[in-house]
């Protein structure tokens, strides 16, 4: 055996060992990467709550509660719409809490949906947030001073603010508006003119109507968003008109209601008590005050 053969024999175990190590590294590398990712995720999961706890001891929870109403003048029998905003003013997030809403019962009454939200829970809040998608609704029952208070109790702090305003008496005839449909309207039912007078309490409508052909009766129903759906009862007759109409919410447009009036007559059948006898056009617009 010459020197070259001897050197080749010495190198064979070394090359084999290197190939084994290289193959093992290729097998272990994906496992190590997955393990490193899992450890990083676990560390982030463990230390994020801990970070919030530490920050809670370093910083105090601070925030402002804003109660905003767009109504320039509020009169008796109006509906006041109020939005509530929370603005944190500290680096630490507000912890979970309970929001309590109170009001002056001598002059205000909450609408049905608002009444169900007088006490509600809040999640953690880290940036300015509006607390409810829909505005809170309060009906003004009497003239005089009124107030609405929002109080937020979190795990570590208490915040509150009060919206104070005066309710003016309802002077003279009430003019219908998009905020409140109460007042007198000119109507046209299948080419027959007349008038209706509505009372709007938290979008629930009651009132009466009179047509020039002598027909008259009571009204009840509701409005919501841009829809107007009411019943026109026809005096002593068992039949009634069901009004299904819409109005434009754009304040720059004239306040008009347009849609269909369906004459519904009783059938005496349990499964289908009403039948549509005919369908006609319906139109209504506000009556401008004299002068």
Image: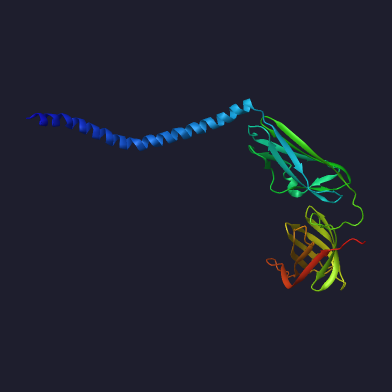
> Residue extending furthest left?
1
Residue sitting nearer the eye, 241 or 77? 77
Seen from the viewer's position, the closer of residues 223 and 168 is 168
Quarter residue 174 falls in: bottom right
Residue toward you, 255 or 14? 14
Q: Quadrant of residue 199?
A: bottom right
The location of residue 30, given as percent across then percent down, is 36, 38
Q: Residue at x 70, y 34 (%)?
A: 63
Work out which quarter of the rendered image holds the N terminus and state it: top left
- Residue 114 position in % (x across, y down): 74, 46
Q: Is residue 28 visible?
A: yes
Occupied quadrant, residue 284: bottom right
Residue 209 can be seen in this image: no
- Residue 291 at what x, y percent from top left? 93, 61
Residue 125 in the image: x percent, y percent?
A: 64, 37
Q: Residue at x 82, y 58 (%)?
A: 206
* Residue at screen point 80% across, 70% down: 189
Q: On the rendered structure, is 205 left or right of 6?
A: right
Q: In the picture shown, does residue 146 fall above or below 224?
A: above
């Amino acid at each position: 055996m010459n020197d070259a053969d001897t050197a080749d024999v010495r190198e064979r175990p070394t090359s084999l060992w290197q190939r084994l190590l290289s193959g093992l590294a290729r097998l272990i590398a994906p496992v190590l990467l997955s393990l490193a990712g899992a450890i990083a995720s676990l560390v982030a999961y463990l230390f994020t709550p801990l970070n919030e706890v530490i920050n809670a001891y370093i910083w105090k929870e601070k925030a402002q509660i804003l109660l905003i109403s767009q109504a320039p003048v509020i009169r008796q029998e109006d509906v006041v719409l109020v939005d509530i905003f929370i603005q944190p003013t500290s680096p630490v997030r507000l912890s979970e809490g309970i929001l309590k809403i109170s009001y002056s019962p001598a002059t205000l009454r909450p609408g049905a949906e608002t009444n169900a939200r007088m006490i509600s829970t809040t999640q953690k809040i880290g940036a300015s947030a509006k607390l409810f998608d829909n505005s809170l609704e309060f009906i003004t029952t009497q003239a005089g001073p009124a107030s609405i208070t929002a109080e937020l109790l979190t795990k570590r702090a208490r915040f509150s603010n009060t919206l104070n305003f005066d309710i003016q008496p309802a002077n003279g005839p009430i003019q219908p508006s998009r905020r409140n449909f109460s007042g007198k309207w000119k109507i046209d039912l299948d080419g027959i003119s007349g008038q209706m007078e509505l009372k709007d309490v938290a979008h629930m409508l009651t009132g009466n109507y009179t047509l020039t052909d002598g027909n008259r009766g009571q009204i009840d129903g509701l409005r919501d968003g841009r829809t107007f759906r009411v019943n026109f009862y026809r005096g002593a007759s068992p039949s009634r008109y069901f009004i299904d109409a819409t109005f434009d919410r754009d304040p720059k447009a004239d306040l008009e209601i347009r849609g269909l009036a369906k004459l519904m007559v009783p059938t005496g059948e349990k499964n289908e008590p009403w039948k549509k006898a005919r369908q006609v056009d319906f139109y209504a617009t506000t009556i401008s005050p004299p002068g």
